[in-house]
Image (tube, rainbow, N blue to C red):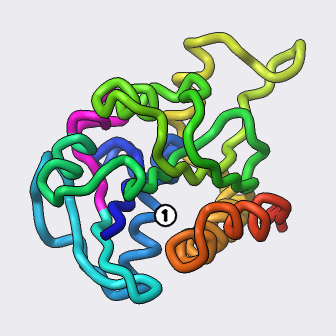
Amino acid sequence: MKIIVGLGNPGKHYKGNRHNVGFHCIDYLADKYSIPLKKRTCQSDIGQGIIADCQVILAKPRTFVNLSGNAVSCLLDKYKANAADLIVIHDDLDLGTGRMRLKLGGRSGGHRGVNSIISCLGTQDFHRVRVGISRPASETGRSRDEDEIVDYVLSDFTVEEEEIINSAISASAEAIKCLISEGIETAMNRYNKRNPIL
């Protein structure tokens, strides 16, 4: 079994935020593979189904991004899975809008949701699907100001960005199917070189 978790914040107020791209990817997978997210467990909305002949759990934690580890560790315990069975989809400020990268393990890259998962699981060894949202621009280049970044990730995609992000979400679904059926190395080689920007 694979547990596929998209990171985001619950509630209508956050629905279109850049920080919620992980939720959007889960919604896309749920629709594509007819896996309704009707069950509530481990502080998450979940659905169970099949992708690439593999049993999967799709999950959207309701803990808010920064406490995602609480929900994820509960899901792994409940379904008797380990970190190697986990795929986490999240936004990434250091990738251009619409770019996608898969990886196994490594640090959080400053993403508080990923950091929470690493802390709760006690390991970095889980799969990531990183969807780029870019950093906010400032007069001196890409902003690293904490307040600006928080405001930016909690703001909605522009109309122009939505088309680009929708393409990335579709590509992420293809990449996850490949990861499940052919492994992380094949998926990285096939999808990390692609640029879904339109």
Image coordinates for residue 133, horizontal then vertical, percent: 67, 43
Residue in the foreground of this view, choosing between 52 and 80:
80
Residue in the foreground of this view, choosing between 82 and 59:
82
Image coordinates for residue 128, horizontal then vertical, percent: 54, 49
Is 144 placed left or right of 10 in the picture?
Answer: right
Image coordinates for residue 137, horizontal then vertical, percent: 79, 26
Write down the region rendered in magenta: 59-70
Vertical arrangement, residue 184 with respect to residue 135, above or below: below
Q: Residue at x 81, y 19 (%)?
A: 138
Indicate yes or no whether the magenta region holds residue 84: no
Could you tell me which secondary element the residue under label 1 belongs to?
A: helix
Vertical arrangement, residue 179 with respect to residue 149, above or below: below
Q: Amino acid at mark 1?
A: Cys
List the single residue furthest toward the right: 140
Residue 16: tell me if it is visible: no
Q: Residue at x 85, y 61 (%)?
A: 193
Tell me the residue that label 1 is attached to.
Answer: 25
